[in-house]
Amino acid sequence: MSKVALRHVVGRRGDADDVLSALAAALATPVTVEDAEGRLLHGQPQAADASRHAITSDGSGIAGWVSGTTEPAAFASLLGHLLSKESERKALGAEVLHLYREVNLIYSFSEKLAAALLEVEGVARLTLQEARHLIAASDGAIMLLEEESGVLTTVAGFGDVLPQLNGLRRGEGIVGAITRSGIAEIVNHVLADPRRMTDNVGIRALLVAPLKVGERVIGVIALGSAEVDAYAAADLKLLNTLALQTATAIENARLFERTVQAANERERLLAANKEIEIARAKLESEFELAARIQADLFPAALPDVAGYDLAARNRPARRCGGDYYDALPVAATGGSSKLLLCVADVSGKGMPAALLMSHTQATLRALVGRPPSLPALATQASDLLYASTAANKYVTAAFLDLDIATGAARYVSAGHVDCLLVRADGTPVRLESTGAPLGLLPPGMPFGETAVALEPGDCVVLYSDGVADAHNEAGDDFGDDRLLDTVTRMKDLSAGTIVDGVLGAIDRFVGAASQFDDITILVAKRQPHIIE
Amino acid sequence: MSTILIVDDEPHIRMLLQQTLEELEDEGVELMTAANGEEALAAIESAKPELVFLDVMMPKVSGFDVCQRTKRDLGLAGTYIVLLTAKGQEFDRQKGYEAGADLYMTKPFDPDALLAKAREVLGLGA
């Protein structure tokens, strides 16, 4: 218990003067009180023969003297008791003040943490600064634990030793062991601790507290001193108080950082998404434009040829397709008129196929009427495409060179699917391939040809493989037989009706299955003689 | 000898302030206490303390009134007055300075800062 000077009880600063005076008056005796050094605190100097008694309190030596003629011992005892009570009051006050200091520490530290930026390093630095202010230390560090790897990383520190523990593993050394146990410790003799990793450090005493959020250890705060026995229980209590608040603040800072990162990432994704959307819209617009350009490559209308009924339709699987059809009047020698009918299918799909399709259309239109025969036209077209396209790009095509007046026709198929001729009486004739696809083989490849006579009522159907290959959800193909059956049933109807009828039959067969290949069909029907 | 007057209507705050400043007694400083504004004015008038730690929120005579009367009515402009108030009442700060206060401190006060201020005002070494 702290020692209290007698002058705090008696004299100018004391409260006992009134009591002493009242007692002295009641006993009709003068009372004099002096401190241990003989300084007068109460009353008047007494005669030399006055009785003098020592004032003692709780065995702490002589605090002063009482002189008087009557009962000086009782006065001394009373003052000793008052002195003892004052000591108790002072000790209690000191304890309350100590607690108040702690409350103030927590309060001001909380305020500083609240004012600090929500940033892990900032919180750690602030904590160490506060810890160093309150607890003597030559070294200090705050290390955060990587939960999965068990590695401690220094986020703030001072001094030469503790900050260098960066990379320490949970369980290693004293600091690592305390991180594992989750229980704060004072280690006042580091060199005597079996957990130490080395003797060769300047730290002789350690104060370590885990940073805990609930029961989870997220890191550790360590203070070190070069002196043994540097730390007391009160220091550990203070450090624990700091650690408790710091852990929560660090956890909040981490949450905040993660929130900010997530927000940034969301912003980045939104921006990227927007860019993609813009690019997609641009691409969409370009596809739209390409589709319009490609649609213009097909004949705006088929030629009106006396004695014949022509109809054709192209339905691309994607926005742009690789199929092509054409019907080109050809001025032949000898004054006869001819008509070149053509259906072509470019290898591949989509935009690359569309580009090759436009190339094919330009090539054929440029060649029409020049070569002496249909096979020669096919050979020249193949040579030109071979020269200007990649090795894996080719075009299958069916050509029918028709003498309008006689109905005599020559048929050349460059690797194309078998096309169809349905006679007026319903007899089907398969028009088979007479050579390799255009552009596939080196220049000079010959093509064969098939002579066909188109009689009144006969109907020739040129089409791409997308017709027979159209399949339904069960994976079954529409097939050549269904095509033949449809055309045969409708052979007496107009070419346009037959084209629509075939497409309608395909649609009904396919159902909800999506179209995977371009579909092109061209029907040329020699009109039957009308008997008046 | 210098005198410090501690004024607060809450006994435990008076005790804390007294305890905080107690070591100054060994350097010849006299600590006085008052439990309300009226007691404070009486003590100021009689003892003329060099330094007053004065609570603001007190019944009847407030810290502002004590401050104003000390500085103006009693003519003790040289008395250093530190107003103490609970955290969150900072909006009264201006009112305190207008009443003549020399400093404003908030509760919970920092004992070390309070002691240092007392030493500074009384011209005592740290």
Image: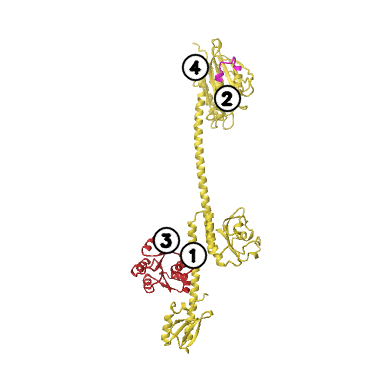
Magenta stretch contains residue A234: no
* As drawn, B89 above or below A477: below
- The numbered mark at residue A103 is 1
Measure how far apart labels 4 and 1 are at the Cα level: 103 Å
Q: Please provide percent x and percent y for residue B61.
A: 35, 68
The foreground one among A139 and B79 is B79
Q: Using a 10 Å C-alpha cutoff, classify the residue at mark 4 as few (fewer than 14 neighbours), some (14 to 19) or many (20 or more).
A: few
Residue tagged 4 = A304
Q: Amino acid at mark 2?
A: Asp
Q: Are marks 4 and 2 on the same chain?
A: yes
Q: Is residue A484 above or below residue B62?
A: above
Q: Are marks 1 and 2 in contact (CB under 8 Å)?
A: no
Q: Which residue is mark 3?
A: B88
Q: Are marks 2 and 3 on the same chain?
A: no
Q: Is residue A20 above or below residue A514?
A: below
Please provide percent x and percent y for residue A350. 55, 30
Q: Same chain, marks 3 and 4?
A: no
Does residue A375 show up magenta in the picture? yes
Element on which disc 1 rests? helix
Magenta segment range?
Answer: A364-376
Judging from the image, what is the letter of the chain drawn in yellow? Answer: A
Disc 4: host chain: A
